[in-house]
Amino acid sequence: MIYLDNSATSFPAPEVIRSAADAMIKFPGNPSSRHTLGLEAEKELESCRKRAAKVLGVESKEVYFTSGGTESDNIAILGGANIKKGRRVVTTAVEHPAVMESMKRLEELGFEVIYLPPEKDGGVTIDAIREAITPDTCLVSIMAVNNETGAVMPVDKIKPILEKTAPRALLHTDAVQALGHIPMSLKKWDVDMASFSGHKIHGPRGIGALYVKSGVTIHTPSLGGGQERGLRSGTENLPCIAGMTTALELLKPEDFELMAGLRSRLRDGLLSIPGAVQNGGEGSPHILNISFPGIRSEVMLNALSLRRIYVSSGSACARGAGSHVLKAMGAPLADNAVRFSLSRYTDKTEIDKTVEAVKETVTELRR
């Protein structure tokens, strides 16, 4: 089996599985309970928060655990948009569905949402962002890395524009695909909020995190028992929190170079196929989007699956719908696109076998 769909989900690392299992056995209590078992669970929860914050380079009180990247995006956007500060919200036309659907909800609530179109490389320029920001802007939400093309957005250059034009506006970034794949610094980027997901970095599914800068107040749409300091109600999923924390601690900068080398090898091999076209530019080292003329995406996916090679046609959350990302880019072969997404566990042999299998599959399907 060759698995190249890591942008949809990555397999949990062995250390992560052990960490989650240990937490399930050692800390069976509810972190909100005031008896001994609850207090022990709460202590472990806060230990995980401190460890996660250390990896992210922030304060522990700025880290909130959620059920995943989608919930983190929902809370940040729906809780961060404040009509008293302004009615304009700026985002891009290539965001993840979790952001796009949140923006639709804001429009229903009376906000004006500006969807910035991407360039041919899949990215949005800082000049386009600057032009879209007005004094009436209350929120800017720009993803750090696109989940379909790997395009890297200029998140680190946005805050100075806001401080000059809309100082009360908040800056949010969906950093789900950035974490563990490109160098990032929440403090240097000076974002107010950032969303993360555990299962994109070899952690468990069903767990995520939201960074909220100290001093930033957002309205929470989550109602209930007031866990996570009132921002995200619901009993904390301690085993998965422990697993995600371990996954964070396993991240290494040298993995970027490893994946970049493998991506280049894969790109060179696939682009040697007649007619193959890359969608997007260089971008993040773990994502490569290629179109094969004359072969629809789902046909290629099924053919490769029979060879036990697993890739995708875009965001798993789109559930087979056409890619709004490639359409926004004006990609002429959007219906023929295949996304290959790597991880630190991908090796050179797998890349070479994939190239050979794709070449054979294209030849067979074009007959």
Image (cartoon, helix red, strand yellow):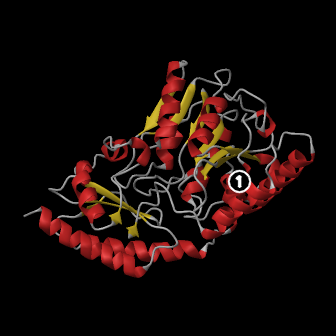
- Amino acid carrying label 1: it is Pro
Relative to 64, say whether 81 is above or below.
Answer: above
Q: Nearer the viewer, residue 336 or 356?
A: 356
Q: Residue furthest bottom?
A: 349
Residue at 79% across / 50% down in the picture? 28
Quadrant location of the C terminus in the rendered image: bottom left
Give how far across and how far down residue 62 sits, in percent. 77, 47
Q: Nearer the viewer, residue 331 or 360?
A: 360
Residue picked out by circle 1: 239
Q: Secondary structure at mark 1?
A: helix
Q: Is residue 271 visible?
A: no
The local crowd at label 1, few if under 14, some if 14 to 19, many if 20 or more residues have their Cα within 10 Å, is many
Quarter residue 88 falls in: top right
Residue at 66% across / 34% down in the picture? 169
Residue at 46% across / 73% down in the picture? 346
Give how far across and how far down residue 86 sits, in percent. 62, 24
Lateral position of residue 99 relative to residue 216, left or right: left
Quarter residue 277 falls in: bottom left
Give how far across and how far down residue 148 sits, in percent. 40, 53
Give how far across and how far down residue 200 sits, in percent. 54, 57
